[in-house]
Image (cartoon, helix red, strand yellow):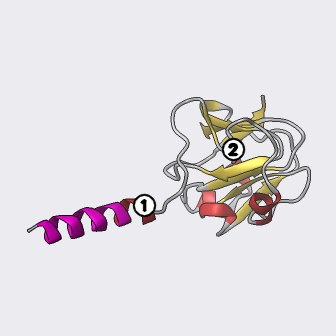
Amino acid sequence: MNRFSALAITSLALALGLATGPAAATGNTATAATTATGNAAPESARASFSCSPGYFCIYSDWNGGGTRCQWSDKQRANTADDCSFIQRGQNVRSVWNATGHRVQYYTQTNYNARVGSTPAGNGGNLQGNYQIRSFKPQ
């Protein structure tokens, strides 16, 4: 019986330790940043996100994967105007902010229902259960 208990505990520990998933940003003050301190993200994190300097980028998949939409505008009242995956109803799963300022983003057009922000030079995975429908500098 002890052997079974040890095996069950080991299996549970492995399952919990090996579980993977996106880092979630929650609440109205969520920040999709790769560092908790707001420092620039490491080069390895930047490499996984393809976002041109001076742009704010959103992605349909985790870790900068899937379809990318990017804007050099400082603000956008309706991202669905020119983002194909938002038009198809897909959620935003990750972001990268290659601008020189913090970007706040909203789940509704015209800067309503703020859901989070990302400092300049940072990005990461979001909860993945909403669309970014507008954004502007903080």
Numbered tag placed on residue 33 in the rendering: 2
Answer above or below: position of 117 versus 62: above
Give the alpha-carbon distance from disc 2 to disc 1, as whole Å.
Answer: 23 Å
Query: Which sits earlier in the primary sequence, circle 2 or circle 1?
Result: 1
Q: Is residue 44 magenta?
A: no
Secondary structure at badge 1 equals helix
Numbered tag placed on residue 95 in the rendering: none
Q: Which residue is mark 1?
A: 17
Give the magenta-colored segment's residue range: 2-14
Q: Quadrant of residue 120?
A: top right
Name the residue: 85% across, 50% down: 98
Name the residue: 82% across, 59% down: 43
Q: Position of residue 10 (x, y in %)?
A: 29, 66
User: For this view, does 47 lie left or right of residue 79?
Assistant: right
Label 2 amino acid?
Answer: Ala
Between residue 105 and residue 9, name the one nearer to us: 9
